[in-house]
Image (spheres, helix red, strand yellow):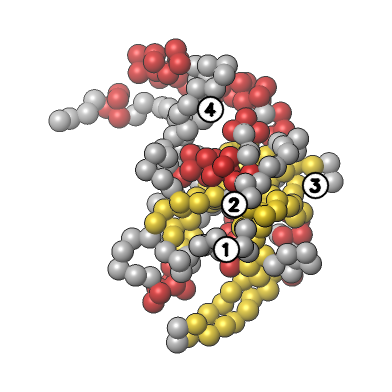
Amino acid sequence: MSVSPDLATVSSPCIGLCRLDRDGLCEGCLRSGEEIGAWSRMDEGQRRRLMEEVLQQRQRQRQVFVQRLRERDGLQRVLHPLRQPPREPGWNRDELADLLGPHAPAEAAVLVGLVPRVEGTRVLLTLRTDGLRHHGGQVSFPGGRVESADRGVLAAALRESHEEIALPVGQVAPLGYLDPLLTISGFRITPVVAAVDPDFVPRPEPGEVAQVFEVPLDYLMEPARLRRIDMDYRGRTRTVLEYDWPEQRIWGATAAILYNLRRRLEEGR
């Protein structure tokens, strides 16, 4: 069946998080149910006006805290856009090539939350509860496996963040994606970078999260703070990344995601 060129190029603000909130607006794109229903009947000019004027204004009114994130413009220049999640297998694939099994990795997503505070932007991190099957007792970002009911990695990251630390959708503003990362535990992680309302008060789910804490972004973006540790694993020397943070050990996949964030910001300067 052929597709009409007009239908094939319809602009849409949908980011896959399709639930109406208490105000009757989509939590993902901020369209009303009426606007969503009429979208296919609008001409392209009407759709563009709604996206560039009406929806942008709604976002500014709802998420004033985003305007206080001083890195926002730089991030939006270098991140993968929300409507186009990255499809690459993983920027560290060569490092793990001999450890990857014959099956495709399980999809996972994490939320790289940036909190705009008066003293500077801070990164929201969690300490996993001891005894978890994956990464117990380690520092990580909120997140987890993409479930069949999730409409993509963005929805998974937001759902997991709500389950783990009670982060409401209204207090988080997704900005874009970092590059996917592969892990030796068999996951392909897509990091979602987002601004988080500084008024947010975490409530950790004790079965998954022992502690929620913040680290200054400037501290983590200093190259001198990142250590490269060589270790022998399965017949060859491998490099593990670790941040020099005095209160917690930030290493492994979490450190690799922060390193990717630093490289992205450096490339955008």
Q: CA distance from mark 4 to mark 2?
A: 27 Å
- Residue 269: tell me if it is visible: no
Q: Mark 4 or mark 3: name the one nearer the start of the chain.
A: 4
- Judging from the image, what secondary structure is the residue with disc 4 in? loop
Q: Which residue is mark 2?
A: 207
Q: Amino acid at mark 4?
A: Glu
Q: Mark 2 or mark 3: name the one nearer the start of the chain.
A: 3
**Pointers 4 and 2 in contact (C-beta within 8 Å):** no
**Pointers 4 and 1 in contact (C-beta within 8 Å):** no
Q: CA distance from mark 3 to mark 1?
A: 34 Å
> Which image quadrant is residue 117 in?
top right
Q: Mark 3 or mark 1: name the one nearer the start of the chain.
A: 3
- Disc 2 crowd, CA 10 A, few/some/many (<14, 14-19, 20+): few
184 is higher (above) or lower (below) than 40: below
Please tell me which residue is depicted at 63% across the width and 39% down the height of the picture.
166
- Residue 148: tell me if it is visible: yes
Q: Nearer the viewer, mark 4 or mark 2?
A: 2
**Pointers 2 and 3 in contact (C-beta within 8 Å):** no
Please tell me which residue is depicted at 49% across the width and 16% down the height of the picture.
32
Q: Which residue is mark 1?
A: 131
**Residue 120 - label:** 3
Q: Which residue is mark 4?
A: 27
> Which image quadrant is residue 11 in?
top left
210 is higher (above) or lower (below) than 232: above
Residue 119: percent from left, percent from top: 84, 46
45 is higher (above) or lower (below) than 126: above
Q: Mark 4 or mark 2: name the one nearer the start of the chain.
A: 4
Q: CA distance from mark 2 to mark 1?
A: 9 Å
Horizontal side of residue 126 vs 144, given as left or right? right
Q: CA distance from mark 4 to mark 1?
A: 34 Å
- Judging from the image, what secondary structure is the residue with disc 3 in? strand
